[in-house]
């Protein structure tokens, strides 16, 4: 029993060491959301262009990646999903500016957002509300594929992402109007 507990403890410790060097960067998302990443509807007049994201040092054994963009400050009681992408092959280490909807890596799936559409949906907090936090996260997953399609709700995909995540890396930016 003691050997089994020690093995589990060491396995968890090694997993955490592998995840320590996983990084996410962006040439587009840096502190404040730019007009390029602001939605173009709901009273907002941005360009609704998905940001560039690059990640590095994924844990050994990563089989795929997923990306989310989430606003925990949305006045919904459950936040707002701005982007949900999964089944990104493990050889991929970046997404270019504007890739959403047309140039995503082969095999990846952009599922539903809280806007009720697929692909990137930019920032658009209620006018006069405090600036909202926009959290962009890349997840390293222990599965090659999540068996869902583009019609899947973000909460469902979030469940599958979190149940297969071995590491995650996030960056946060703010936007208010």
Image (cartoon, rainbow, N blue to C red):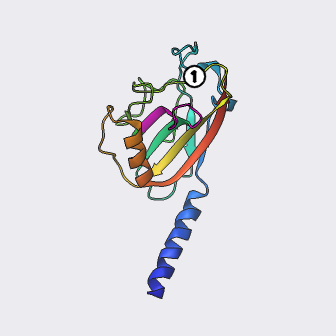
Which percent across, then down, holds residue 143? 37, 52
Which residue is located at x 52 percent, y 37 percent? 77
- Which residue is more in the foreground, 137 or 25? 137
Rendered position, 133 above or below 147: above
Report whether residue 156 is seen.
Answer: yes
Residue that badge 1 annotates? 124
State yes or no: residue 81 in magenta: yes
- Residue 88 visible? The answer is no
Of 171 and 126, the residue lying toward us: 126
Residue 42 rendering spot, x and y as whole percentages: 52, 16
* Image position of 84 with respect to 45: above or below: below
Which residue occupies 51% across, 81% down?
6
User: Where residue 46 sits in the image (x, y, percent)?
Assistant: 58, 15
Residue 82, image x and y in percent?
Answer: 50, 30
Task: Please identify the quarter of the rendering in which residue 109 is found.
Answer: top left
Residue segment shown in magenta: 72-85
Q: Nearer the viewer, residue 13 or 82?
A: 82
Query: Dot 1: few (<14), some (14–19), or many (≥20) neighbours within 10 Å?
Result: many
Is 101 placed left or right of 32 in the picture? left
Position of 109 with respect to 11 (left or right) is: left
């Amino acid at each position: 029993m003691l050997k089994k507990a020690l093995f589990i403890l060491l396995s968890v410790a090694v997993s955490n060491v592998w995840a320590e060097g996983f990084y996410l960067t962006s040439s587009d998302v840096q502190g404040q959301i730019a007009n390029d990443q602001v939605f173009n509807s709901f009273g907002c007049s941005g360009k609704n262009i998905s940001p560039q994201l690059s990640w590095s040092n994924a844990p050994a054994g990563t089989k795929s990646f997923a990306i989310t963009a989430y606003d925990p400050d949305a006045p919904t009681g459950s936040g707002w999903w701005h982007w949900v992408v999964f089944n990104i092959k493990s050889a991929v280490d970046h997404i270019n500016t504007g890739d959403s909807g047309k140039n995503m890596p082969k095999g990846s799936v952009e599922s539903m957002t809280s806007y009720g559409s697929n692909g990137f949906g930019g920032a658009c907090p209620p006018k006069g509300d405090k600036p909202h936090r926009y959290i962009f996260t890349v997840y390293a997953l222990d599965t090659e594929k999540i068996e869902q399609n583009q019609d899947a709700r973000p909460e469902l995909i979030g469940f599958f992402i979190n149940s297969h995540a071995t590491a995650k890396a996030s960056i946060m930016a703010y936007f208010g109007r």
